[in-house]
Amino acid sequence: MPSKKYFPVEQPSLAWDLPGLMAGVDEAGRGPLAGPVVAAAVILDDLKPIQGLADSKKLTAKRREKLFDEIRAKALCFSIAQASVQEIDQLNILQATMLAMQRAVEGLRLRPQKVLVDGNRLPRLDILAEAIVQGDAKVSAISAASILAKVHRDRLCVDMHQAYPLYGFDQHKGYGTQAHIDALTAHGATPLHRRTFAPVAKVLR
């Protein structure tokens, strides 16, 4: 069974208020059959613009990796958090996603005046927040959060593959591809699988 080292969380400490700051929030990993759901919150620095920010799904893996490093270097602050497989099964994927987003915002070193969240739902926050549908394509800070969450989760999937090489997590990233379903059928579910998701539950019957 993999240890907790496969699910690192980056959460800077010492939050304090600074008027006018805006954070973007997004997640990665709602749809997969395995692994945690990851969320990121980012406050960009207007004095250090980052070119090419976009919805992470529209970027190549190589471009995401480059932007991941640039965002971490240039942002005023960022936080990456997650909700575990166990929390997903206990709460449901929507509530677990909201929990990961809440943790990401709470982990910011600087406290934003407002939080912009991708999608149409908001996590429970004590800060002014707004949900923006397709925000990862409209708001740079949300795009940056999308990239951080996606790259971080993809790296987790590489670790998951090392722990369970028969499942191909490094390729499908936990999504329900035919290769993943075939591996589930042949080898059963791992502790990394979301047991409340239908394809996994079917194998566990």
Image (cartoon, helix red, strand yellow):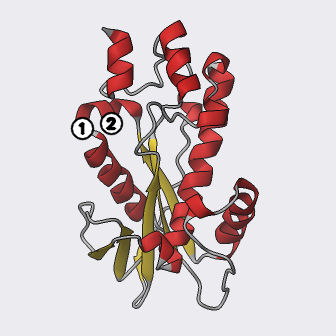
Q: Is 6 located above or below residue 137 in the figure?
A: above
The x and y percentages for residue 22 are 43, 82
Disc 1: CA contacts within 10 A as few (<14), some (14-19) or many (>=20)? some
Q: Is 188 located above or below residue 19 in the figure?
A: above
- Regarding residue 12, the answer to whether it shows in the image is no
Residue drawn at point x = 54 percent, y = 37 percent: 7
Which of these two is toward me, 85 or 137?
137
Q: What is the spatial separation of the Cα atoms under label 2 and label 1, in whole angstroms?
A: 5 Å
- Regarding residue 130, the answer to whether it shows in the image is yes
Residue drawn at point x = 41 percent, y = 91 percent: 20
Q: Secondary structure at mark 2?
A: helix
Q: Quadrant of residue 155?
A: top right
* Residue indicated by mark 1: 91
Q: Image quadrant for the N terminus? A: top right
* Residue indicated by mark 2: 88
Q: Is residue 205 left or right of residue 145?
A: left
Q: Quadrant of residue 195?
A: top left
Mark 2 residue type: Ile
**Tally of marks:** 2
Residue drawn at point x = 53 percent, y = 8 percent: 186
The x and y percentages for residue 125 are 26, 66
Mark 1 residue type: Leu
Tags 2 and 1 touching, CB below 8 Å: yes
The x and y percentages for residue 62 are 76, 57
Q: Is 79 located above or below residue 73 in the figure?
A: above
